[in-house]
Amino acid sequence: MVTKLTYGSSIYGLLSYNEDKVKEGKASFQFSRNFPYEDSKMSFKDKYDHFKNFIDLNVRTKKNAYHFSVNFANEDLPKLSEETKQNVVSEYMESIGLKDQPYLVYEHFDAAHPHLHVVTTNINSDGNRIDIYRQVNEHSEDARRALEIKYDLTIADDQKKEVDKILENVDRISYGRDLTKASLNSTILKVREVYKPTSIEEYSRTLLRHGVVLDRGQKGTPQRENNGLVYGFSDDYGNQVGQGIKASRFFNKPTFTNLEKDFSNNKMVKDKYFGAIAKAVNKQFYEHLKFTEKSFREKLEKEGIGVSYNYTTAGMISSIDYHHKQSGALYNSKEFKLNASDLYKKFGDTTLSYSEAKQLSRSLSELWREQFRKSEYSFESTFIKYLDRNEFLNRFETKEGRFSSKNLESSLDNFIQYKHTNFEKLYKKDLAKFNNYAVPLVRYLKDNRALNISDKEAIFRSFDIAIKKEEGRTIFHHLKDPNVGMVLQKSAAKVLEPSFGSADVIKGELSKGEKQLIKFLANRPYKHNDIPKNINFSLYRSSNLKRILNDADREFIETNYNKHYLNLVKNQLENGQITNYKDLLNHGLVVEPTSEKNGEWNYVARFYNNEKRFSIPVGNELKKWLNEEGITKSIYDQEIFKRVSQRYENYNLKYRLMSQLNEIKMAPIHSHQENAYKLENIYSQISKQNKGMANEIAGKVEEIYANQDSSAEINLNQVREVLYAEIESCKDPEIGNNHIPEKSLDNQVSISNHPSIESSGGGLRISNDDEEERRRRKLLKRFYDDLER
């Protein structure tokens, strides 16, 4: 149960308000207390005259008309019999000290919940003024709680939402449907009761929303100069219909003078809640990228703030009125520091918070990048040109289905619009990206006399570059994006002139590593930066690149290769993983003494596969260590001689085995058993030198056995072919012609994985002793030690 107290200076107005409701069928008279007449026989005049008798006893008290509303929850309706309603009102009036005052009780039906209205006065039979406000403040809460418990009514705190509806339930009246004066009077009274306007403009706008036009007269007319007000009905467009009624003819006298008094009092209320309203509105503004009129109203409704929109003749929002429900204070959007036009721009046909917009933007950017990478286009400016919006939107909706279609479509359109707005900037960025590698490549290949035109065109195609001559101009552009490119100027235009190169130097497509190396070398004259880690300089010996690169390129590559590899070895030396000169050689670093001065040798170093002429000085620290180790020219020659001897031994083994196999092929007169014995002998020699190759041969021979009839003799010619192919596949044992590490310039690669000089082919190999072999040697040593005892 909730009670509300209002007061005024016209008991006639309060009576008229309730009696008019009765006439309209929106209320019924319930009962009276302390009146000398029977309820059923009392007229309007009887009721007014009895109140007038009390009021005339104290003419100094101006605010002498009091009005209570007693509100019940809808859940209480089955409990509210006529007797219960009478008892509740009577006991409540007695509890707040108004038992002996005359009062009338009406029940209204124009709200969404049951409620009663009580009309009384604060002048008692002795002519004294009763301080009803003080008595209500002191006793109303206790009385209300006692009645809620006694009659099992809904607790007031649980009924708060329904109480808010009371304030908003001011019906819009309509001309021709409602009684003119009575309806206008009722609406004006309710508006003044519920709302707290502080200006005639606020008051006029509030009335207009409830179907009432306030006419102040044209400027310069007597009505305007004398502050005369005329009230009338409004149509749906805010225009007055029918005859208006002067303010002085209404019982509550809503004249300009009386309204100004209300405005003055209402300003204090407005100032009190101004900060709370501004905070609530700012919160919605800064949290949302856009919202609908409905969603904006609903969000502020939850904060206890009513929202009404004012529109221009074009249907655009011109201002927004806010109604603080608790106090009734009214505010307009133009009163706040927040730019009203910025607020209005956010209204649209969808609602989206900034956090949601940020999430959508991130998701949209990810999808955009994903689709761009999957597309056939290399540049974003071309991708935008040929974008299928509907297909992209479908993918976006699939990815972010939890958002409304309007939000997704709006976000995508804004994103595409942004891209198109910045298209020129994006195109220049793409062009710069293309020219960044295309122009240096053109200049690099222009003077390469080893290549013919077809070779150059093949290289350009590998980089997705198309070059053509058109109307005397040399034009180059991206192969897949013809719009990205430009005209070659000056000497660069000579790139497709005939050269002295032989045809078809380029064999097949360039690999990714080969293209990276070419791009790096082409850009080297224009960039002074460190060598990228992903460059594999070892590829310069590939069949495609060995004819493209010139001496300057090879010198640069091998010199830097040597520098980097030397640093790797120095780190191993500092960590104790290299302890002597032999370890240096075994790890692929050839360190050669060059000259002696005052008993101190100078040294140069190179990676084992690089040319000797590109060797580099070892540096003072390594030089000092090598001299301390006593590494001289003779020691270097001894170590190299050992490896060269081993190289030729293995070299001779390879060709000796191939010769033996050729003898088997050339001597078919030999018996099957004799040829089988010879093949077995060759296989045993291979197994001693290279177990991995022996295992591969054994597997292939087993396949030969599996594919023939078990009763037939094995086809020795097939076995011979297997042995011959495996041996021939071994590389010739020449220094500098062995496998080159693929990541020799990668700082993350351990140097222990680089080849050593003790290669079975005479070059360098990884020096990792076989665990089984070490165990065998240890057992043999123990056996011989036992024999000597």
Image (cartoon, rainbow, N blue to C red):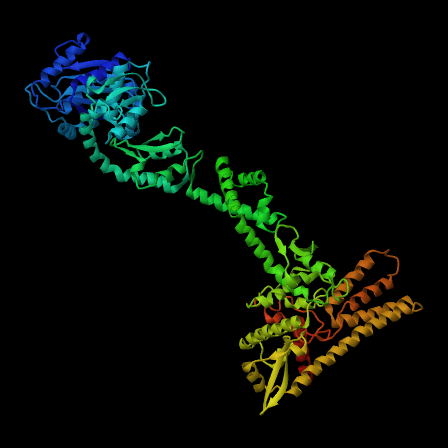
Viewer-side residue, 502 vs 170: 502
Horizontally, residue 488 falls left or right of residue 151, namely: right
Viewer-side residue, 390 vs 627: 390
Residue found at x 57% / y 56%: 432
Q: Position of residue 780 (x, y in %)?
A: 68, 78
Place residue 108 in its image quadrant.
top left
Q: In this view, does 402 lie above or below 93?
A: below
Q: Which quadrant is home to the C terminus?
A: bottom right
Residue 402 seen in the current view: no
Place residue 438 in its image quadrant.
bottom right
Place residue 774 in its image quadrant.
bottom right
Q: Which quadrant is home to the N terminus?
A: top left
Q: In this view, does 632 lie above or below 274?
A: below
Residue found at x 49% / y 35%: 406
Q: Where is residue 126 in the image (x, y as percent from the top left)?
A: 5, 20
Q: Position of residue 691 (x, y in %)?
A: 73, 68
Residue found at x 60% / y 67%: 524
Viewer-side residue, 668 vs 543: 543
Q: In this view, does 386 lie above or below 117?
A: below
Q: In this view, does 602 lie above or below 535?
A: below
